[in-house]
Image: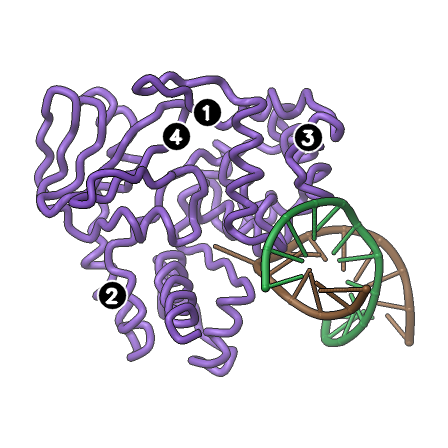
Chain colours: A purple, B brown, C green
DNA sequence: GAACAGGCAACTC
DNA sequence: GAGTTGCCTGTT
């Protein structure tokens, strides 16, 4: 991979193991939206850490709007550019099924999302489908997030926990998030008041971080594992939802020793999840 | 209209 | 402690 700084864009030439469509649509994030237009490229617009960007993929490589400063300050880390996913896929090829799943999912990268955003969106995700999760999260940002001007458009940052903490269930009613509204407010208040220190949890051992997240009302094992994997950078966290349950019982009879995938069980999970969902869609 | 959806918590036994 | 049920809302 070679990084080239153009005037208004950063190019990742020969981007290895980096597929935008897979990365943005494998269920880990909800704020990157496809931009229709030039059919020769795959383009997405999104906001992360209060900064907006267009990211597009052509036959040449990946192009991220913004120059060197934005890239070094944010996107290099956000897109996990330094990690060698090819080597990880080889490490994960410990059985035929995992090997197939990893090959199929090649190009997925685990985004280093804002901890609070990941926690909040996965609270919203419970018992919900992706279009609705996306809608609720978009509404939340639109109503309460800081506006971010981008190419004659106005996008919205994910609202800070302090902002959400100051709201009431009534304020959240337009989101139509149902019983999850109470959980969102509770989590926001815990973070805003410092009872839950997400930055500290990034450095804490994985199990400890997950247990801390689970002290929140409305956060169980699955949501905590998601928040840890996608928000805290715990690449060995292993969220098991109904899709994963189905795949694991079909392939491993329900019992799989996660030590086989360590320390990248989270990446293995993403490959299995994506593979299971894709094959379900193409066969139905 | 009933069942369900990428869960959680409270309640049962 | 394992199993059951209600919860908001939108879709099928």
Q: Quadrant of residue A190?
A: top right
State the separation of the CA atoms marked 2 and 3.
44 Å
In the rendered image, residues at marks 2 and 1 fall on the same chain: yes
* Chain ID of residue with mark 1: A
As displayed, is residue A47 above or below residue A203? above
Give the crowd class for mark 2: few <14, some 14-19, many >=20 residues within 10 Å: some
Numbered disc in front, either 2 or 4: 4
Q: What residue is disc 2 on?
A: A91
Which chain hosts label 2?
Answer: A
Q: Quadrant of residue A174?
A: top right
Residue A212 shown left or right of residue A34 in the figure: right
- The residue carrying mark 1 is A157
Residue at 32 percent of width and 72 percent of height:
A98
Give whichever of discs 2 and 4 has the lower sequence position: 4
Give me the disc on residue A48. Answer: 4
Of A47 and A41, nearer the camera is A41
Point out residue A119 in the picture as x, y percentages from the top left corner.
54, 40
**Residue matched to label 3:** A172
Distance from disc 3 to disc 1, alpha carbons, whole Å, reads 17 Å
């Amino acid at each position: 991979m070679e990084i080239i700084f153009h005037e208004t864009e950063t190019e990742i030439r020969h981007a290895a193991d980096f597929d935008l469509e897979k990365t943005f649509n494998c269920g880990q994030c909800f704020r990157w939206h496809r931009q229709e237009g030039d059919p020769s490229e795959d383009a997405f617009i999104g906001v992360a850490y209060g900064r907006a960007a267009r990211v597009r993929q052509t036959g040449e490589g990946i192009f991220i709007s913004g120059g060197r400063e934005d890239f070094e300050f944010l996107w290099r880390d956000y897109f996990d550019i330094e990690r060698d996913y090819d080597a990880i896929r080889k490490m994960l090829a410990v059985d035929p099924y995992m090997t197939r799943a990893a090959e199929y999912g090649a190009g997925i990268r685990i985004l280093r999302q804002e901890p609070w955003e990941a926690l909040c969106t996965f609270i919203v995700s419970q018992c919900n489908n992706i279009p609705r999760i996306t809608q609720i999260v978009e509404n939340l940002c639109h109503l309460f997030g800081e506006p971010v001007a981008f190419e004659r458009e106005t996008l919205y940052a994910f609202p800070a926990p302090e902002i959400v903490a100051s709201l009431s269930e009534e304020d959240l009613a337009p989101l139509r998030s149902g019983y999850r509204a109470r959980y969102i407010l509770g989590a926001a208040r815990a973070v805003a008041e410092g009872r839950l220190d997400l930055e500290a949890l990034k450095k804490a051992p994985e199990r400890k971080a997950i247990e801390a997240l689970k002290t929140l009302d409305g956060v169980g094992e699955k949501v905590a594992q998601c928040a840890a994997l996608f928000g805290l950078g715990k690449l060995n966290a292993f969220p098991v939802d109904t899709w994963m349950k189905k795949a694991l019982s079909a392939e491993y009879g329900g019992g799989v020793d996660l030590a086989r995938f360590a320390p990248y069980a989270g990446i293995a999970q993403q490959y299995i999840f994506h593979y299971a969902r894709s094959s379900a869609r193409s066969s139905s």
